[in-house]
Image: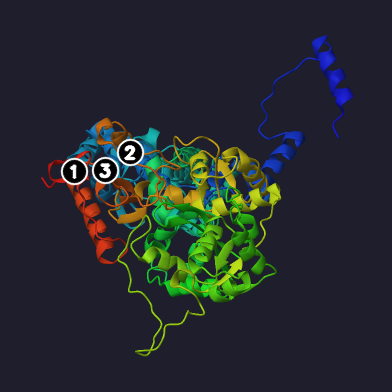
Amino acid sequence: MFDVPGLAGLMRDVAARKVRLVEVESPKPSPFARSLLFGYVGAFLYEGDAPLAERRAAALALDSTLLGELLGRVDLRELLEPAVVTATERQLQWLTEERRPRDAEDVAELLRLLGDLSDAELAERGVAPDWPVALEGAKRAIRVRIAGEQRWIGVEDAGRFRDALGVALPVGVAQAYVEPVPDPLGDLVARYAHTHGPFTAAACAARFGLGVFVVEQALRRLAATGRVVSGEFSPDGAGAEWCDAEVLRMLRRRSLAALRREIEPVPPRVLTTFLPRWQHVGASARGVEAVAAAIEQLQGTAVPASALERLVLPARVADYSPAYLDELCASGEVLWAGSGAIAGGDGWVTLAYADTAPLLLPPLDESLALTPLHQAALDALDGGQALFFRALSDRVGSVDDADLIAAVWDLVWAGWLTNDTLAPLRTLLGGGGGAHRAKPGAPRTRYRRPGRVALPSRTGPPTVAGRWSRLPERDTDPTRRTAALADALLERHGVVTRGAVAAEGVTGGFAAVYPVLAALEERGAARRGYFVEGLGAAQFAVPGAVDRLRALADEHRRSTTALVLAATDPASPYGAALPWPERVVAQEGTGHRPGRKAGALVVLVGGELVLYVERGGRTLLSFVDDDDALAAAAKALADAVHTGALGALSVERADGEAVFTSPCAPR
């Protein structure tokens, strides 16, 4: 505990001028400050949930001397940027274009700063062959043999090289340049360290033709005076290394600056590349396991039934088959629920795993007025009953199949009933109905011998095939529901923004899930930050998502992959996390505006929105003028039609004009 009364008394003494405050800069922190710094280092060591760039930046901001005392060794191998190390060493070695020597005077300065250089090394730096010869004629440079190689040195270093390495000097060197110095080898090693990045003692010894032990002794003397530091520095190195203290500070500053640029928010367009990849759109995953993984990300969000098996799941599973989803439903692992009807026989469907369904399935639609037939059907299925349609009809005592079928589907879209297969839903949509129309499949009929009287099927009409059952009771506890929803949002989006939450129609909006997301951050299960530019500072991400997002910051510019997605697909950020591009909003005369509507499509090329196709496919809007991008988007649409994901498309209007006179027409 802090001595608050003592602090108050001290402050009174300071105010009364009984105590004078003196500012002192010490080479090492005081015991109190050391404990605070140790706590900060400890927080860094155990804060593993932060993105990699933030962790590296925090580590580089620490005092390396204190860090070495606490950890036993200064280890910056994982922190220094390789590109920064390389660029800095080239600059120190005068290998950059801006440091090219221009005349013999620059060569004299080069030899003074870098020391011994061979003819090849001088040529590498752009030195003309006659410049060092001119310096030699002026008695300002001499040629000596070092480590079996002829090199040039400045005449002022003649005594150091003679005493440290035992080299033979040419005749005629002035006496002033051969006077003994206190530590000639230390001077040469210190200059080598000051003009290189991290290096090993063996590399320095090889440069001067000395034994490694001799160089190590010189380095230890320099380390005792604080001129060099020992540790692990090079990102691609191994073992103990040495580095000049000033050079190391420069490397840390430049690496920290590079990391701070890296942790800047990425442009919004990067999110359009990240989100489909995060949800494995276009991946090569196959089989029922891939479907299960896709459902794990999609559970709790409503998608049009007509898009679920034509666009949404096939986009994530390379060999998607309806049998995969039926297998998961029949086994009881996955439940599907209606979340509201849509005009044209379509409706919104929500998938969820059985163990999380009470928390993630939407609440029951209270607007449905339950008739006696509705209530009778619910009572017949009470207590965990699962019945085929004909058995249900018998229990209800219905004599009109059409009325009971209508009642069953009313209860489905209101969130009361489900089925152990999606076959009835497919049949309902198969006759060309639904917002996303596909080629109707051949109707499945029961085999009957010619002349035999047709009897009612025990499973009922195809639109109510399979076994019907009641969905589990919804968990009404708001805390548990919101916590499950927050986990699902993080799993689905990777980086959760206000717009993404609003697009999913969450009750209470972003404000409802914000406290749970903040609690997840405190637990280390999520990270809050400003990751995507322009989407607000309250963004939450799971560990790993931020690193993947930043890794795509450059890659998205090179991608040309075309994706056809339902406008309501969670993998499309437009109209959710990102607004629709303003170009179309400005076209007031088109009569159409993009939106996350059932039946609408978006075509992304390289993560950029290129086309928006209205429901029915007769009208589209373009967002780019690039002919190559438009051609790629059109081909992707045609391929989707040919594979059966979409029905026949007959585009009549584009950007408010007849298609052949619109900006989308071939030029």
What is the secondary structure assignment of the residue under circle 2? Answer: loop
Amino acid carrying mark 3 in the image: Leu
* Residue named by callout 3: 621
- Residue 435 seen from this side: yes
In this picture, residue 485 sits left or right of residue 575: right
Question: What separation in Å lies between label 3 and label 1 (alpha carbons)?
Answer: 66 Å
Nearest-to-viewer mark from 2 and 1: 2
Assess disc 2: are there few (<14), some (14-19) or many (≥20) residues with their C-alpha within 10 Å of its C-alpha: some
| Amino acid at pointer 2 | Arg
Residue 217 seen in this snapshot: no
| Mark number displayed over residue 568 | none
The circle drawn on residue 129 is 1
Vertical placement of residue 634 versus 315, above or below: above
Along the line of sight, which residue is nearer the eye, 431 or 8? 431
- Residue that carries the numbered disc 2 in the rendered image: 593
Residue 401: percent from the left, percent from the top?
Answer: 50, 69
- Count residues near mark 3 (Cα–Cα under 10 Å), then give few for <14, some for 14-19, many for 20+: many
Label 3 element class = strand
